[in-house]
């Protein structure tokens, strides 16, 4: 599966520019928000198992702290760039703001292929990275979390290294941790569950309900699997799923749990028995009511937007729809639930975990999921209402509404602080 190459920072700034114009704010406000407050680049050297030493470039971007400490994940990927990390930190500012969380936006990344590293090499890389950024992170300063190819084990290494550096126990310095180290079991399902809840609420408004509606899911990692699983439990029919190696289309319905089993046993959901094999990109164009792109960025472009048949697109991934593609979709009347709304379940659960750590343990996983659902329902309602009341249908979309809400909250906080 290939995404169209572009500079994600250009895309992020283009979205910000649009929100600034819709809000009637001046250029100076745009300039303040178009660049991060801080970007730290570090060099991480790792002694490999074969005795060689490899050097990896890594970054932590802290975009805006008007609403609170920086919050955002750390990704390990061979194509990570500084501009990508900056753009992601900007998107986290808007995601946290829209969700009503007391956080600013941050993001980290290491240019590495973790799939070819041993567990020992990965641990050394993780510890050295967190030691290198330890001066700028903290419970009330910057709280990293998992992202692409990082997981609770990596967070455990981060936490332990920070404890060594600071000579203290600060469990809230990272979220998405293992349960035994202050994490929540609900964290693993939270992003996918949030996608499902937001999609359900939008389906009530635009499709007359979720029951019986057909769904295609592109990307069958954590987010795609749980989105499919919960949407099916809510009454939808998941008719197609795909991963990086291919997909399967079954109009009568795919069992998300069996699809996961097939993926684990054979390496791809494309081997799901009885269905029609399709490519990862073909899944986007199937005749379904709801499409959930949950893989990588920029898979819906101006080249394929005109062929998409779904009535609702719920962005489980970050940035799966380009600006030019969304213009086409908006004109077609397709409703796009933007990433900063639809996939905010992970960071909302991270906030619940962070509060839980600071209070010494106060919530069950059932209570955490209930709070997450309430938040997603309310956020989806507010975005749809803002779109209906303040914007022009057919020309503006839900992303415009979401960005207006998020940017305006950050700008108000900056004004109150006296920054602008």
Image (cartoon, rainbow, N blue to C red):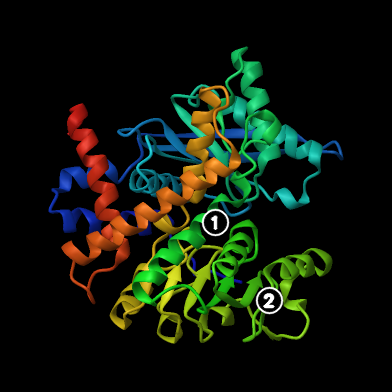
Tell me if mark 2 has few (under 14), some (14-19) or many (20+) residues whose alpha carbon lies within 10 angstroms of its own: many
Q: Please say if 127 is above or below 367.
A: above
Q: Where is residue 193 in the image (x, y as percent from the top left)?
A: 54, 56
Determine the secondary structure under disc 2: strand
Which quarter of the figure has residue 64? Answer: top left
Q: Is residue 334 left or right of residue 369?
A: left
Q: Considering the numbered disc 1 on the image, is that residue within a helix, a strand or a loop?
A: helix
Question: In the rendering, which numbered label is found on residue 335?
Answer: none
Separation of disc 1 and disc 2 at Cα? 24 Å
Work out whether residue 281 can be spotted. yes
Tell me whether circle 1 and circle 2 mark residues in contact (CB < 8 Å). Answer: no
Q: Nearer the viewer, mark 1 or mark 2?
A: 1
Depth check: 384 or 89 in front?
384
- Examine the rendered structure and indicate whether residue 312 appears above or below residue 17: below
Q: Where is residue 264 in the image (x, y as percent from the top left)?
A: 79, 63
Label 2 belongs to which residue? 246
- Residue 193, label in figure: 1
């Amino acid at each position: 599966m290939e995404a169209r190459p572009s500079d994600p920072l250009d895309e992020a700034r283009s979205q910000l520019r649009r929100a600034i114009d819709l809000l009637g704010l001046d250029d100076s406000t745009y300039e303040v928000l178009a660049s991060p407050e801080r970007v730290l680049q570090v060099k991480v050297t790792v002694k490999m198992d074969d005795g060689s030493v490899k050097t990896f470039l890594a970054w932590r971007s802290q975009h805006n702290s008007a609403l609170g400490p920086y919050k955002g994940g750390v990704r390990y990927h061979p194509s990570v760039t500084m501009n990508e990390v900056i753009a992601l930190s900007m998107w986290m500012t808007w995601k946290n703001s829209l969700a009503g969380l007391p956080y600013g936006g941050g993001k980290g990344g290491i240019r590495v292929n973790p799939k070819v590293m041993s567990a020992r090499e990965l641990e050394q890389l993780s510890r050295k990275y967190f030691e290198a950024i330890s001066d700028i992170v903290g419970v009330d300063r910057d709280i990293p979390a998992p992202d692409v190819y990082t997981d609770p084990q990596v967070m455990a290494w981060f936490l332990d290294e920070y404890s060594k550096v600071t000579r203290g126990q600060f469990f809230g310095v990272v979220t998405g941790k293992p349960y035994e180290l202050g994490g929540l079991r609900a964290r693993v399902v939270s992003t996918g569950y949030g996608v499902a809840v937001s999609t359900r609420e939008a389906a009530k408004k635009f499709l007359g309900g979720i029951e019986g509606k057909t769904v295609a899911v592109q990307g069958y990692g954590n987010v795609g699997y749980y989105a499919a699983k919960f949407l099916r439990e809510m009454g939808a029919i998941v008719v197609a799923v795909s991963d990086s190696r291919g997909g399967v289309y079954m109009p009568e319905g795919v069992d998300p749990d069996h699809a996961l089993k097939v993926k684990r046993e054979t390496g791809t959901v494309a081997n799901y028995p009885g269905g029609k094999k399709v490519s990862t990109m073909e899944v986007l164009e199937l005749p379904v009511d709801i499409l959930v792109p949950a893989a990588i960025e920029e898979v819906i472009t101006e080249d394929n937007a005109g062929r998409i048949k779904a009535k609702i697109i719920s962005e489980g991934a970050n940035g799966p729809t380009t600006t030019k593609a969304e213009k086409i979709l908006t004109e077609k009347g397709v409703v796009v639930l933007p990433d900063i709304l639809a996939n905010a379940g992970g960071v909302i659960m991270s906030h619940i975990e962070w509060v839980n750590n600071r209070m010494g343990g106060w919530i069950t996983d059932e209570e955490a999921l209930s709070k997450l659902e309430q938040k997603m329902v309310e956020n989806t309602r507010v975005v749809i209402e803002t779109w209906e009341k303040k914007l022009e249908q057919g020309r503006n979309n839900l992303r415009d509404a979401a960005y207006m809400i998020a940017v305006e909250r950050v700008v108000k906080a900056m004004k109150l602080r006296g920054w602008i």
